Structure formats: C-alpha cells, structure tokens
C-alpha cells in the first residue's frame, strides 16, 4: 500500500517547490552522507539519512506543512529542501534550507526561501519565523542576511553544536 501526503506546490520564476517523493531519496542520501552535511549534524549513515528523509513525510502528515523539495522548472530532480517546519524541541517555527551539490551560488536558496516565507506568512498564518544556523556555516549566515534576517540571541536552540538564531522580518516587512 502506498500512502500519499497532500502537499501544495509553489512556483517561482525558476523553481518548483513540491512535496517529498521517494525518487528524491538518492539525492538526499548523497548529501546527508557527505561532508557538506556537517552543518546539520552529519555526515550521516544511510540508515540515519533515511530516518531524516522519512521524517519529512511525517512532518507534513502531522502538521500539514513542511520542507519542500526544490526542483528547477522543466526538471523533477531534487536540488535541495527548503521550507517551514517546527520539529519537536524547536523554540519557534523555523524556515530551514539545504541545497544539494551543484545548486549553490545561483540564487536558488534565496528565491525558494522567499517563496516559502511568503507561504508561511500568507497560508500558514505565521507572524514570525527563525532560522537556526551553525556558527561555522558562513554561506547560510550570508543567505539569512540577504533575506533581511537579524541575529536574535534571545532564542534558545536545541543543538549540541554552536548555533546562532536569525529572526526573519515579519509579514508586513517581508512582502
């Protein structure tokens, strides 16, 4: 039996943001097992990567929203995951992002994050969002700043690694 989760689709100028699919697994596993995953607690074994991958479906099923798979228009190949989520232990709802190899440096993350933030505010009714970022992840911190986020040291984080919290502009400022 195959169970499907109803996920909306967001279209931007260059991208399609859609729900997770089984076909996305190998791209995720390659990222999760690589040194690039060091900023999210990795590298991970395939088994641990599978648990994180499958939890995306669970988040959608439990909350009705979650991280979107990012694809380029005209291709269904997963190039990352970006979107709103609120896992157990998080202080507040988060807008998170991960790009797979070959997708960085092209404005993809910014374009997708802006669309996901708008979705979180307009569709989910969020009034604020944060992003947890490993202190060593300079590229992710730079993206947060390009998105208009500011450091918010008052927000606790649930990680063992050093982490900073960026606060996104509210719905009125993020239009």
Image (cartoon, rainbow, N blue to C red):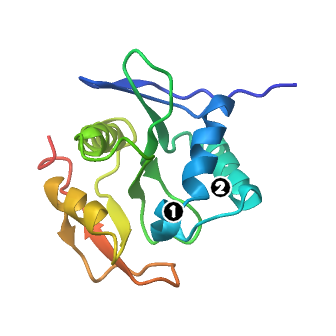
Q: Nearer the viewer, mark 2 or mark 1?
A: 1
Q: In the depicted view, which residue is nearer to us: 114 or 6? A: 114
Q: In the depicted view, which residue is nearer to us: 51 or 84? A: 51
- The answer to whether residue 98 is above or below residue 133 is above
Left/right placement of residue 35 relative to residue 22 reads left
Q: Position of residue 46 (x, y in %)?
A: 73, 55
Q: Counting residues from the N terminus, which is met first, the one under dot 2 or under dot 1? A: 1
Disc 1 marks which residue? 37
How crowded pointer 1 is (Cα within 10 Å; few <14, some 14-19, many 20+) is rated as some
Q: Quadrant of residue 130?
A: bottom left
Q: Which residue occupies the extreme top position in the image?
A: 74
Residue under the point 36% across and 69% down? 133
The quadrant of the rendering that contains the N terminus is: top right
Q: Label 1, secondary structure: give it.
A: helix
The quadrant of the rendering that contains the C terminus is: top left
Instruction: Quote the CA–CA distance across marks 2 and 1.
Output: 12 Å
Left/right placement of residue 26 relative to residue 11 reads right
- Give the mark count: 2
Left/right placement of residue 13 relative to residue 30 reads left
Disc 2 marks which residue? 52
Residue under the point 38% across and 68% down? 132
Question: Which of the numbered marks, if any, corresponds to residue 26?
Answer: none
Residue under the point 59% across and 66% down? 43
Contact check, label 2 and label 1, Cβ < 8 Å: no
Residue under the point 27% across and 62% down? 139
Q: Position of residue 157 (x, y in %)?
A: 44, 78
Q: In the depicted view, which residue is nearer to us: 76 or 52? A: 76
How crowded pointer 2 is (Cα within 10 Å; few <14, some 14-19, many 20+) is rated as some
Q: Position of residue 69 (x, y in %)?
A: 49, 36
């Amino acid at each position: 039996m195959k169970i499907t989760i109803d996920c909306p689709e967001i279209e931007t100028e260059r991208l399609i943001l859609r729900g997770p699919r089984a076909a996305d697994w190998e791209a995720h596993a390659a990222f999760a097992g690589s040194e690039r995953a060091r900023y999210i607690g990795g590298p991970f074994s395939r088994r641990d990567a599978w648990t994180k991958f499958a939890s995306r479906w669970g988040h959608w099923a439990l909350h009705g929203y979650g991280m979107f798979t990012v694809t380029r228009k005209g291709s269904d190949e997963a190039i990352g995951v970006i979107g709103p989520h609120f896992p157990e232990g998080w202080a507040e709802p988060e807008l998170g992002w991960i790009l797979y190899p070959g997708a960085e440096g092209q404005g993809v993350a910014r374009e997708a994050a802006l669309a996901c933030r708008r979705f979180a505010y307009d569709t989910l009714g969020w009034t604020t969002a944060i992003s947890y970022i490993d202190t060593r992840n300079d590229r992710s911190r730079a993206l947060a700043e390009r998105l208009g986020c500011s450091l918010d040291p008052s927000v606790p984080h649930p990680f063992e690694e050093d982490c900073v919290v960026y606060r996104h502009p509210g719905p009125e400022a993020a239009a």
